[in-house]
Image (cartoon, helix red, strand yellow):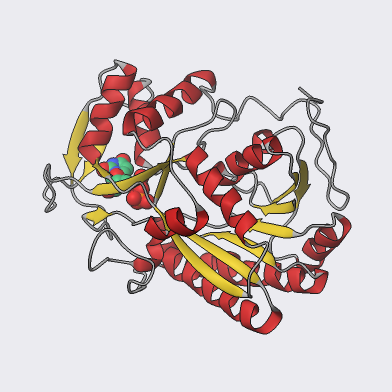
Amino acid sequence: MRILVVGGAGYVGSTTVERLVADGHDVTVYDDLSSGHRASVVEGAALVIGDIADQGHLERVLTDGGIDSVLHCAAKSLVGESMVEPGLYYRNNVAGGVALLEAMRAAGVNRIVFSSTAAVYGEPRRVPIAEADRTEPINPYGATKLAFEGAMRWFCAAHGFRAISLRYFNVAGATERNGEDHDPETHLIPLVLRVAAGEASHVQIFGQDYPTPDGTCIRDYLHVTDMAEAHLLGLEATGEGDPSLEVYNLGSAAGFSVREVIEAVRKVTGRAVPARAVKRRMGDPPVLVASSRRARRELGWQPHHSKLEEMVADAWAWKLEHPQGYATGPRPGAKAAIDAPDRVAAGAGG
Ligand code: UDP
């Protein structure tokens, strides 16, 4: 496949690009590097720096690159920020997404996989959550992802698109090359690892009076390489069939509590991890776990790294190798292009 990965310099995007390139696909990354990292783009993929709202630019990149399918991983994704800056989320995640769809339509590209979120469900009435369950997001982040799914659905009906939306919760772990590097960091596992590394004095536990066995929130965690595989399977599945939007949840079937995560970090790192319970974080449901039965059945997806300790160990190994994250500078030999993708040959550039 000749794939455009929009948001391909982010955590999930870059790891998926790594996998796609390893599998011999022709990959172009389109990213504004607002939160992604140039150094995360693997050798062998082209990097085009551009704005998702720039429909004309996207159309040129799609046409010039002979692209046949799109993976859309570009989104503003901080729940807290979305609550105070909803306009930013509607502009980027909805208006920007529609610019991408319009560019695809103009370029004659009709296959898309969207990296969505299980935040579209809001507070679930039951767990594990299934695809047909009620979608009632409780923050602009989830609302804008759901709105974009709606746009995709209508592009399928009107313009013959074949689309897949992957809804998931927490992603963890790393490959040897790529890992999690957010600024600001708000996610539990990297924050706990910072404490283990001595970069912070303690981890805050947001609430310990939830109706769960140990009183802390339970979340679904998926290894980032299993996510990469799901995205690849999704892209392959858009190659045939009638125009439609198909929705798949991705989950690990088992959730882990905040305390279990902290315990896993203590065990894996052998370091002390002081923790203090503080008050609940706004908008946190007690348990969020998604059922991935449909993805397993129809996409043939099978997570291989569901053990919490494995995810933590991989994230820890990456952190030890990259104490400053990607801040060690751009990948040697990498050049970004504005209009003409700069394809860096595999192995070249170090
Ligand atoms: N959490 C916590 N302390 C932190 C960060 C997160 O107790 O410093 C909790 C949070 O309340 C949630 C879980 O850890 O129950 C996972 O949060 P995260 O922000 O990593 O992902 P989310 O589930 O919100 O997507």
Residue 36 is situated, as x and y percent measured from the top left of the image, at 61, 44
Asked whether residue 203 appears in the rendered view, the answer is no
Toward which corner of the image does residue 222 lie, by quadrant? top left
Residue at x-position 77% and y-position 62%: 58
Q: Where does the image place residue 335, in percent across and percent down from the top left?
A: 82, 36
Query: Which residue of the protein is positioned furthest toward the bottom in this rendering?
Result: 158
Q: How many marks?
A: 0
In the image, is 270 to the left or to the right of 319?
Answer: left
Q: Can you name the residue that lies furthest to the top here?
A: 270
What quarter of the picture does the C terminus occupy? top right
Is residue 76 among what the camera can see? yes
Q: Is residue 343 above or below residue 72?
A: above
User: Residue 188 versus residue 155: which sits nearer the camera?
Assistant: 155
At 35% across and 67% down in the image, what residue appears?
A: 121
**Apparent side of residue 138 relative to residue 325 in the rendered image (left or right):** left
Image: 207 above or below 63: above
Residue lying at 81% horizontally and 67% vertically, measured from the top left: 56
Q: Nearer the viewer, residue 300 or 321?
A: 300
| Residue 188 on image: x %, y % | 34, 40
Quick check: 350 left or right of 120? right
Q: Is residue 182 left or right of residue 191?
A: right
In which quarter of the view is residue 138 placed? bottom left
| Residue sitting at x 69%, y 58% | 70
Front residue of this view, candidates 120 and 235: 235
32 shown above or below 192: below
